Amino acid sequence: MSITAKAYIEHEDLALVPTLCDLDGVNIRVIHQATTDPTSSTFPFVIEYDDLEELEETLNRDHTVTKYERIDSNNGTNIYQIQHTDTAKLISPAVTQVNGFLLQSETKDKGWLIQAQLLSRDALNSVWEYARENDINFRLLELYEKRKGGSDSSFGLTEEQQKALEIAYEKGYFSEPREMSLEDVANEVGISSTAMSGRLRRGMRNLLSSTLVED
């Protein structure tokens, strides 16, 4: 059995977050490689930003960056090899330590949206514990289990609960501060706020029960 987890992580010392916060409209994603070294602090990135001079001035000020090398640049799409400082916070060591793989990492808001393939719920708990110990805000968004025979399980979520949780997240209901009220989220789905509240509670209960409580 393996699981695929999608999460949002946030901390001011996460890799390249200072650059993300300083440059309006910048988009950053990691070019993932198969690595078994949890101590690695150098990664290739794609950074989408038109003003190359401003971008590199910002990288020079970024306290999570030790050094960088521009590999390629074309029409605002720039590829860099970036080495991080010892004080930069990374989630990749925790994933690699439990023999997992980061499938996707891209910036969102003031943090990173990540997708990881892990061997078990225990591995996910280890990554979550690492985040907690390092004061990294870790929000689990989606979780799927690969069962025998290749089928996927949505961990007890009904289609309505999954849709409600996805819309609530996308519209900022779980953000701090909250970007949309429960009533507004309910209006997006076309149900009452009372029904939406119950749907979100049941969805979160089912998700937690399926992922954090062993059978």
Image (spheres, helix red, strand yellow):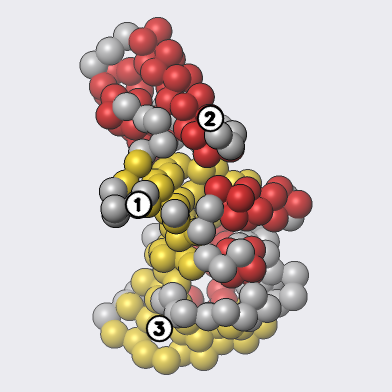
177 is higher (above) or lower (below) than 43: above
Name the one closer to the observer, 124 or 148. 148
Asked whether the viewer can see residue 174, the reply is no
Name the one closer to the observer, 146 or 208. 146
The residue depicted at 32 percent of the width and 9 percent of the height is: 192
Mark 1 → mark 3, Cα distance in angstroms: 39 Å
Mark before the other along the chain sequence, 1 or 3: 3
Q: Are marks 3 and 2 in contact (CB under 8 Å)?
A: no
- Kind of residue sitting beneath label 3: Ile
Mark before the other along the chain sequence, 3 or 2: 3
Residue 167 vs residue 57: left or right?
left
Residue named by callout 2? 209
Q: Position of residue 157 (x, y in %)?
A: 37, 30
Residue named by callout 1? 148
Q: Quadrant of the C terminus?
A: top right
Secondary structure of the residue carrying tag 2 is: helix
Q: Quadrant of the N terminus?
A: bottom left
Name the one closer to the observer, 182 or 55. 182
Mark 2 → mark 1, Cα distance in angstroms: 21 Å
177 is higher (above) or lower (below) than 47: above
The residue depicted at 64 percent of the width and 75 percent of the height is: 38
The residue depicted at 74 percent of the width and 75 percent of the height is: 86
Q: Residues within 10 Å of mark 2 (few under 14, many from 20)?
A: some
Residue named by callout 3? 79
